[in-house]
Image (cartoon, rainbow, N blue to C red):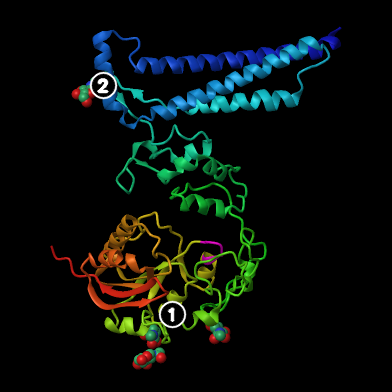
Amino acid sequence: MGRKCIPKCKTARIMGWVQIILGGLVILVSILSLTRFYYAGFFLHSEEICEHLYAIKDVNVGLDAKALSDRVEQVLDMLESLQGKLELKEKEMEKNKGITLDKKFLGDEIVRPLHSANVALRQIRLPKMEEGGNFTVKEDPLINYFVTEEIRKYITSKENRIGKINLYGSDKVYNTIGHACVLHKKELEQYMDYDIGSYCDDDWNLAQKLMLNGCDPLPRRRCLTRASKVYHKPYPINESLWRIPDERNVMWGNYRCRNFECLSSKNPKRGYSKCTGCFEMEKEKVKWVSNTSLSADFLISDVLSIKPGEIRIGLDYGIGTGTFAARMREMNVTIVSTALNLGAPFNEMIALRGLVPLYVTLNQRLPLFDNIMDLIHTTGFMDGWIDFLLLDFILYDWDRILRPGGLLWIDRFFCKKKDLDDYMYMFLQLRYRKHKWVISPKSKDEVYLSALLQKPPRAI
Ligand SMILES: *[C@@H]1O[C@H](CO)[C@@H](O)[C@H](O)[C@H]1NC(C)=O
Ligand SMILES: *[C@@H]1O[C@H](CO)[C@@H](O)[C@H](O)[C@H]1NC(C)=O
Ligand SMILES: *[C@@H]1O[C@H](CO)[C@@H](O)[C@H](O)[C@H]1NC(C)=O
Ligand SMILES: *[C@@H]1O[C@H](CO)[C@@H](O)[C@H](O)[C@H]1NC(C)=O
């Protein structure tokens, strides 16, 4: 008799537990909804309502009410669908006495959704009431927008231990993400979906896509980045500067090409369009050191001779494989080069040559302090597509990091002839001293503009 009872009792017991859990959730949701009504002043009397609403207006600045109600709605939906499934199963069981709750159904259809509903509810952070009835918003920005636990853990501010003030003079540390991450919730959740401590997917291209779309900075992750299985030590610096790196040191999984020869400009299926020919050393070797037919091309030696010995550090803002930095290194000038892996491994290439790639997008303020750089060189990055306002912010940012007397080298900026006046105005608005200024035709309706400008002293 005991044996016969086992499956039935088990089912009954499981159903009992499910009911208890569901009940608990319903209570939680109710409390939350009530709390929200209470905030809105539903249980207050007329004058109090006004006072209360007035107060709420003041404190609600930081509370993302929409995200909050979205979360609650999401959980309610989950509960509803769960209830539907359970009822269906119940009917099925009634009709066909043979059917029992199997483990897979319990796990996939009940326990997992219950768990995620539970997590979603627990993660909602409501503003805390302070003594005396004042609201204070303790909620971290965006915290109620994201459900994925790892994202929330990342963006939650981390308070110093035992109430100390840290070396920055603050009591907590905020990890930051770009605000446009909000627009790419699904992709961000995919990016942050990993087991802590395990290997990350080979998904730098997903990460870069997020960055380019404004989710920049990206959250840090707690998984181990994959590397090439056959990584060999890089060539010594006396060889690496002008040698195509060992292709085994690059993860090729997300490119069209699988080696450096394939990236040649002769290959129509190379997978990138900016900076074609950048991966051919014979083409790179002549840049900035030999005269060309284009008057908009300046030579490094000419530029450095304007300020002999004064140019020591600089930034190369553009798309390239580090050739400008390599040449400048030979002139004892240290250059960091911005790099994005747009269809080809630009970052790896620059680093394997023994130079410093700076992985930044156009979105961000440059991670460099004010008035420090001797030189900014820019080529191949911005041309006639760029929005004037965006360019304006970038120009002022360059101005910020350039030291008084520093040089801004605009190299082969190109645009439509009809836009030239506007762009010229923008470059000249900062009232830099003009050392060189050359406009030469690119095609029938496009022109090149190259300029060497010097930031004036700012004695104010
Ligand atoms: C509540 O806030 C008001 C205005 O900010 C303040 O004057 C008052 O002292 C606060 N009350 C308490 C108990 O903190
Ligand atoms: C580079 O330097 C290493 C040791 O410093 C030397 O053995 C090697 O021959 C050099 N290579 C070239 C191409 O000069
Ligand atoms: C480039 O041309 C100029 C004048 O035409 C000449 O003085 C200079 O030596 C040339 N430089 C190189 C590197 O060929
Ligand atoms: C760079 O520095 C080295 C070592 O100080 C020196 O020998 C070399 O002549 C310098 N090169 C240039 C182009 O100034």
The amino acid type, in three-letter code, at marker 2 is Ala
The image quadrant where one finds the C terminus is bottom left
Q: Residue at x 68, y 14 (%)?
A: 87
Looking at the image, residue 324 lies above or below residue 202: below
Dominant SS type (magenta): loop
285 relative to 247 in the view: left or right: left
Q: Quadrant of the N terminus?
A: top right
Tell me which image quadrant ligand 4 sits in: bottom left
Is any atom of residue 175 visible in this view?
no
Relative height, residue 144 to residue 24 (above, below): below
- Start-end of magenta stretch: 341-346
- Residue under numbered circle 2: 55
**x, y percent for residue 112:** 64, 27
Q: Which of the marked residues, 2 or 1, is nearer the chain's N terminus?
A: 2
CB of mark 1 near ligand 4 (< 8 Å): no
* Residue pointed to by mark 1: 327
Look at the numbered disc 1 and give the secondary structure of its residue. Answer: helix
Asked whether residue 99 is in view, the answer is yes
Q: Residue at x 61, y 58 (%)?
A: 254
**Quadrant hosting residue 290:** bottom left
